[in-house]
Image: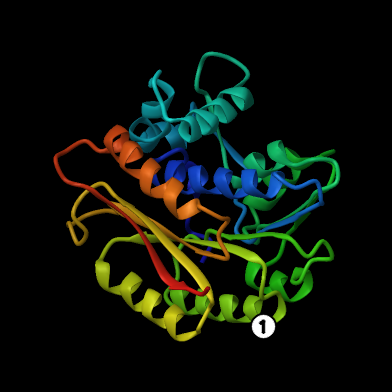
């Protein structure tokens, strides 16, 4: 535990994928004037300097955000995401990649609220510093799964729980299933987004089937794979499951993800998937 450090992977293809989805979810919440709540259960350090030794050692951002940074003809939703990253960088050079806490904070309005959880003893103070003075933002140094008992349901009764664990420990899919069960019991109409890696196909297939058995009324799955799954050495794909997704998000992602794949992939392989695991009337 606590061995994983996202600084080595910041801005990679998985970050781009999940944050493109995150921006879509937040934009949907922003369409109404009523305040909303966001709980980020695995917040990390908040943001990452791409000039750091950690980022430079692996250089995964070069095959991720750097590819979008250099594109000049993007679909509107990808352009929105790229413009958000550019605004946070405050210049023409890509030197900083914002994690989900900074992305959410940037889009937050005065009436909205953001709670960030980070249990890593080294990342927590960095996150605190990054959020110092931010209105409507609370940073807590606790396990994100435990925080669900305190913050769900939120007083705003609308919002998002964003779950992005590192998967450094065994049993993460089981913990996520339990978390979704708890959220459904306490906040049935709340929106939840859960990111997961795909190194092999079988674990995520079992995860999807288990979620179907939980009878969550509205459950959408979206995936991006740069190579064939089960390819040796490394993560070549990832996905997000979304409980109570915004209206027409499925159509947006079906249109958007193939374009994103074309920008990010290096070889002839790759695939996208957008599928309802459950869809009630």
Q: Is residue 175 above or below residue 88?
A: below
At 39% from the left and 76% from the top, the residue drawn is 207
Q: Nearer the viewer, residue 28 or 139?
A: 28
Where residue 228 sits, quadrant-wise, is bottom left
Residue that label 1 marks:
185
Q: Nearer the viewer, residue 209 or 44?
A: 209
Q: Residue furthest left?
A: 268
Q: For mark 1, give the secondary structure.
A: helix
Q: Is residue 76 above or below residue 41?
A: above
At 65% from the left and 75% from the top, the residue drawn is 183
Where residue 181 sits, quadrant-wise, is bottom right
Residue 245 horizontal side relative to residue 189, left or right:
left
- Give the percent coordinates (x, y) of residue 80: 54, 31
Q: Residue furthest front?
A: 281
All told, the count of numbered labels is: 1
Mark 1 nearby-residue class (10 Å; few <14, some 14–19, many ≥20): few
- Give the percent coordinates (x, y) of residue 89: 59, 23
Q: Residue furthest bottom?
A: 213
- Give the percent coordinates (x, y) of residue 157: 78, 65
Q: Is residue 248 above or below residue 87?
A: below
- Give the percent coordinates (x, y) of residue 256: 39, 41
Where residue 104 sits, quadrant-wise, is top right
Q: Nearer the viewer, residue 194 or 11?
A: 194
At 62% from the left and 63% from the top, the residue drawn is 191
Q: Coloring scheme of the render? A: rainbow
């Amino acid at each position: 535990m606590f061995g994983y450090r996202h600084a080595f992977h910041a801005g990679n293809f998985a970050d781009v994928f999940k944050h493109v989805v995150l921006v879509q979810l937040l934009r949907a919440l922003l369409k109404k004037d009523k305040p909303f709540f966001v709980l980020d259960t695995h917040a990390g350090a908040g943001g990452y300097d791409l000039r750091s030794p950690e980022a430079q050692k692996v250089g995964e951002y070069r095959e991720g955000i750097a590819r979008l940074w250099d594109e000049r003809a993007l679909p509107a939703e990808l352009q929105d995401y790229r413009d958000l990253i550019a605004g946070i960088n405050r210049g023409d050079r890509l030197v900083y990649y914002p994690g989900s806490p900074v992305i959410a904070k940037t889009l937050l309005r005065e009436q909205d609220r953001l709670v960030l959880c980070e249990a890593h003893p080294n990342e927590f103070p960095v996150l605190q510093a990054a959020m110092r003075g931010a209105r409507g933002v609370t940073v807590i140094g606790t396990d994100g799964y435990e925080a669900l008992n305190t913050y769900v349901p939120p007083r705003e009764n609308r919002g998002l729980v964003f779950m992005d664990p590192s998967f450094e420990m065994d049993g993460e899919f089981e913990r996520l299933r339990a978390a979704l069960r708890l959220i459904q019991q306490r906040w049935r109409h709340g929106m939840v987004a859960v990111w997961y890696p795909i190194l092999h196909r079988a674990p995520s297939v079992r995860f999807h089937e288990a979620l179907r058995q939980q009878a969550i009324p509205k459950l959408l799955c979206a995936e991006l794979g740069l190579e064939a799954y089960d390819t040796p050495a490394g993560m070549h794909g990832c996905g997000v499951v979304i409980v109570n997704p915004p209206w027409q998000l499925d159509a947006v992602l079906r249109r958007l993800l193939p374009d994103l794949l074309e920008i990010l992939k290096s070889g002839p392989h790759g695939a996208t998937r957008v599928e309802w695991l459950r869809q009630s009337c």
